[in-house]
């Protein structure tokens, strides 16, 4: 008995230990709201599942062969009360869970800006094979496989892909969203606590998929200003030619920072993925040469 209790404790500790650094450990308002939706839906479903399991066990026990008090009704075929009970429970479940999902989907609509007195920071995201490019258009810098943001500041993402469809996801901040060539998706997130959070690709995209992850470095405002200053003073420039080299398939790419970015590069990448702009990036590259 003692060993069984120890085993249960260890299994429970291992199970809940796996909840850290994931959707059950939110570090921002969007992730916290998404977790609450999950808990609400789970609570509604458990309110149905647990009584159903108990009722099944109770019926099996009451109508056991040795119970002489149980009524045997071989001719029973219909009960209006029983039909009402059987159908009302799943209908109420669908209404409640659907209502939670409906309200939550509107409150957490990815393009919807986060209410804040702090001006959002724009970040343009490009999924490449097999790495992530982050462009800060207002600051004029860029980074690969590392996203640095100030704590408590809304981040307005504009996302696209250089080719294969991918999926941008930071579990502790919330808001998994797809990236597609020639299309732009939008996402708004915010980190309320400093730290380093893991970002991943949540959509298989080829041989280098397993290494297609990045760190989100959330730092105080003064350190973010220092990081911007340091980034602008060192590193290469990201123009069409260097982007062309960066866009080539590569795996396990170390984080890189670019001190400057050609204005409009994100729009050039975006238009290059559309049917009407397939040669736009090539023309831009030739004009620089």
Image (cartoon, rainbow, N blue to C red):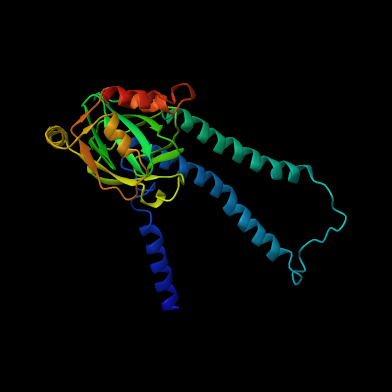
Residue 283 x/y as whole percent: 36, 23
**Location of residue 68 (image quadrant):** bottom right
Number of numbered discs visible in the structure rendering: 0
Identify the residue at image location x=19%, y=36%: 236
Residue 2 x/y as whole percent: 41, 78
- Front residue of 183/149: it is 183
Residue 256 x/y as whole percent: 23, 42
Q: Is 62 on the left-hand or right-hand side of 18?
A: right
**Location of residue 7 (image quadrant):** bottom left
Q: Is 219 on the left-hand or right-hand side of 6?
A: left
- Front residue of 137/13: it is 137
Q: Residue furthest right?
A: 75
Identify the residue at image location x=38%, y=37%: 127
Taking 233 as reference, is 131 above or below it?
below
- Front residue of 9/69: it is 9
Taking 283 as reference, is 161 above or below it?
below
Taking 170 as reference, is 280 above or below it?
above
Q: Is residue 110 visible?
A: yes
Q: Is residue 115 visible?
A: no
In the rendered image, which quarter contains the C terminus? top left
Identify the residue at image location x=65%, y=38%: 91
**Location of residue 149 (image quadrant):** top left
Taking 281 as reference, is 249 above or below it?
below
């Amino acid at each position: 008995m003692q060993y069984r209790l120890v085993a249960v404790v260890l299994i429970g500790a291992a199970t809940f230990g796996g909840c850290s650094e994931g959707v059950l450990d939110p570090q921002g308002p969007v992730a916290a709201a998404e977790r609450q939706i999950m808990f609400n839906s789970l609570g509604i479903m458990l309110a149905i599942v647990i009584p159903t399991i108990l009722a099944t066990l109770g019926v099996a026990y009451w109508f056991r062969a040795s119970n002489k008090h149980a009524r045997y009704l071989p001719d029973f075929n219909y009960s209006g009360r029983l039909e009402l009970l059987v159908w009302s429970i799943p209908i109420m479940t669908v209404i409640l869970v659907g209502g939670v999902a409906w309200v939550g989907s509107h409150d957490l609509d990815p393009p919807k800006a986060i209410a804040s007195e702090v001006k959002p920071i724009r970040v343009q995201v490009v999924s490449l094979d097999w790495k992530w490019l982050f462009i800060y258009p207002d600051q004029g810098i860029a980074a690969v496989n590392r996203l640095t943001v100030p704590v408590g500041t809304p981040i307005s993402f504009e996302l696209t892909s250089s080719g294969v469809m991918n999926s941008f996801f930071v579990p502790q901040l919330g808001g998994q969203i797809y990236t597609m060539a020639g299309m732009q998706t939008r996402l708004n997130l915010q980190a309320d606590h400093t730290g380093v959070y893991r970002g991943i690709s949540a959509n298989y995209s080829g041989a280098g998929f397993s290494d297609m992850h990045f760190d989100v470095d959330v730092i105080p405002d003064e350190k973010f200003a220092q990081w911007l200053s340091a980034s602008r003073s060192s590193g290469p420039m990201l123009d069409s030619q260097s982007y062309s080299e960066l866009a080539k398939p590569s795996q396990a790419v170390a984080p890189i920072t670019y001190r400057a970015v050609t204005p409009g590069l994100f729009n050039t990448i975006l238009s290059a993925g559309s049917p009407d702009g397939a040669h736009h990036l090539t023309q831009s590259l030739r004009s620089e040469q």
